[in-house]
Image (cartoon, helix red, strand yellow):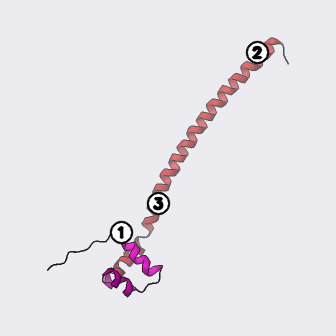
Amino acid sequence: MASTRRHFTPEQKVSILREHLLDKTPVSEVCDRHHIQVSLFYIWQKEFFENGHRAFAANGRRQRRVEDARQQKIELLEAKLHRKDGVIAELMEEHVELKKSLGEP
């Protein structure tokens, strides 16, 4: 009877590595519990450490998108504020002209 090959998701791999790295569980116990070869564990660990920077790079792109959206909103609000300042300035000018025409100080 042929056994089917198991595939682990990236989340499962990180969880398995975490057991050893954070919980200080011996590699042999982790491998026995998950029915994987020790060599496979070390391959995953090597890949994890070599590509760990990508986790932060993806977050950086997401963060840039959030910052870009925030910057666009700031620019929109500044433009709106500028328009309001212009309207208030026109109203104040008309108010002063009206007071002058009525002879009020």
Q: Earlier in the sequence, mark 2 or mark 1?
A: 1
Residue at (39, 78) in percent of width and height: 45
Q: Position of residue 12 (x, y in %)?
A: 36, 71
Residue at 36 percent of width and 69 percent of height: 10
Badge 3 density bin: few <14, some 14–19, many ≥20, Cα 10 Å: few
In the image, residue 60 lies at what x, y percent? 48, 59
* Extent of the magenta region: 11-40
Q: Amino acid at mark 2?
A: Leu
Q: Which of these two is toward me, 53 or 2?
A: 2
Q: Nearer the observer, disc 3 or disc 1?
A: 1
Instruction: From the viewer's side, name the closer residue of 7 and 100.
Output: 7
User: 22 above or below 92?
Assistant: below
Q: Are marks 3 and 2 in contact (CB under 8 Å)?
A: no
Q: Residues within 10 Å of mark 2 (few under 14, many from 20)?
A: few
Tell me, yes or no, whether the highlighted magenta stretch contains residue 36: yes
Magenta part mainly helix, strand or loop? helix
Residue 28 among magenta residues: yes
In-image side of 27 versus 66 (left or right): left
Residue 105: x, y in percent? 85, 19
Q: What amino acid is found at the position of numbered circle 1 in the picture?
A: Pro
Instruction: Tell me what residue is drawn at x 51 percent, y 46 percent.
Output: 69
Image: 29 above or below 47: below
State the residue position of label 3.
Answer: 59
Give the mark, 3 or 2, whose residue is nearer the N terminus: 3
Q: Amino acid at mark 3?
A: Asn
